[in-house]
Amino acid sequence: MAKQDSTIDLVFGLDDKPRFSVSVFAALQHVLASFIGIITPTLIVGGVLGLGSEVPYLVSMALIVSGIGTFIQARRIGPIGSGLLCVQGTSFAFLSSILAAGFIVKGNGGGPDEILSTIFGVCFLAAFVEIFISRFIDKLRRIITPVVTGTIITLIGLSLIKVSMTDIAGGVNAPDLGAPVNLALAGVVLITIVIFNRFQFHMLRLSAVIIGLTLGFVVAWSIGKVDFSGLDELSLIAIPVPFKYGFSFDFAAFMPIAIIYMITALETTGDLTANSMVSRQPVDGPVYIRRIKAGVLADGVNSAIASTLNSLPMTTFSQNNGVIQLTGVASRHVAIFIAAILALLGLFPIIGGILQQMPKPVLGGATLIMFGTVAMAGVKIIAEAGLNRRNMLITAISIGMGLGVAGVPEVLSAMPQGLKNIIGSPLTIGALSAIILNFLLPQNMDVAPETAAEPAVTAENSESSEAEKRSMSRAAVSRPANS
């Protein structure tokens, strides 16, 4: 079982109340570390699905619900909320499934309103999957083990690389697709992020993505690739309207999103464990279990609220654990200031309007690294679970099936359309494959029968099992936002 990190020197503990100036300064650092992670999924979905004029409003809603979710998670409302300094933000893990849902509606002739109606309706109902499993999250990890979780996270990252590369080239159906200027803009962003990740100063590393995007945006503006002419048409204030676009449901879209809710529940468990460690809180025993269950419940409730207020599903961000270590401020009262700043930013659609003008190659240069990091976070979880024959077989088959369906969708051409929509998602078929194989394959398939009872082998298996239990919490420390 993981232990508290005694090397962390906290200036303000979990229930301390720092003075106003300290709270605001710490809150700004959390917002800076989280901002890009909160808005990027919305920008990607809006760009890929052609949501156009709706994007500024959707970005505003993402910021507002992130503030609401952060407040609920830290403040605790009844049984909801971990009571830790956790920032809630839009999850990257749902991107491929949400894009698939949007393409289903688009393929049936639906416009932006119909697309958003289905996405938010499906995400709202699927959020109750996470709410339900939060009550026995400690038992779920015996079924969905680190090798399953790692495989699915790897698939998520790999399946999104195509989105990044398309943006780097200029975007879907761009007239200058693959133009050298597009590749150069993406290169500026990518190189900037790499350079700032080499700095020893922790805050510069945390800010590498936002610095890279800002520099790329400025360069693009200087060469005439940014057009602000439409900003004066935006409304002054963004008002949350529950289910503004309606409420629709599609079962084929529901299945992969429901599976991701199960996976993000386990990721949240790892993030909350890591947060407890850096906040010098218990990481075992009844207090810890209650905190984990309440935190995962808050994740599900916040995602339902997000769908209601026209935003994408939420999750607990992991990079904010690094901010706690950097500042020495673990006070959950700082979350009130974080929530206020995010909600205030979200009130003004002009912020989303400006961000919408970010050229695709600039965004693609950043997301290529972000999605690649998501994939590598999954690989890390698999490696920590142990690269034995059983785990490699599960991973190889599941990733092969997921990427295979994505690369050659014609393999399902003879299937009924309803079934094709469900298992045609790389994430769905890969996740189901990993879960089924993990259930069917014997745990001791790497142990020869005549040596199965030897003490050395038993000890090795015990250590491997313990490594699996610890892998999620260790990976959470380095996992990118919204993976």
Image: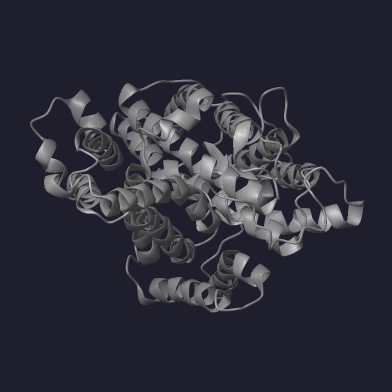
Q: Quadrant of residue 10?
A: bottom right
> Viewer-proximal residue, 84 or 169?
84
Q: Can see residue 172? A: no
Farthest residue toward the right?
A: 19
Q: Quadrant of residue 373?
A: bottom left
Query: Going 58% across and 69% down the picture, which residue do you hit?
Result: 208
Q: How many marks?
A: 0
Q: How is the image coloured?
A: one colour
Query: Going 38% across and 56% down the picture, which residue do you hit?
Result: 384
**Percent from the top left, x then y, of residue 339?**
74, 42
**Percent from the top left, x then y, of residue 49?**
40, 43
> Viewer-proximal residue, 399 or 48?
399
**Percent from the top left, x then y, of residue 47?**
45, 49
Query: Going 66% across and 27% down the picture, which residue do you hit?
Result: 80
Q: Does residue 127 lie above or below 311 as drawn?
A: above
> Viewer-proximal residue, 217 or 205?
205
> Viewer-proximal residue, 362 or 50?
362
Q: Does residue 460 lie above or below 303 as drawn?
A: below
Farthest residue toward the left?
A: 414
Q: Is residue 343 left or right of residue 112?
A: right
Q: Can see residue 412? A: yes
Query: Going 37% across and 32% down the picture, which residue do you hit?
Result: 259
Q: Does residue 209 lie above or below 60 as drawn?
A: below
Q: Quadrant of residue 287?
A: top right
Q: Is residue 336 left or right of residue 126?
A: right
**Percent from the top left, x then y, of residue 419?**
20, 26
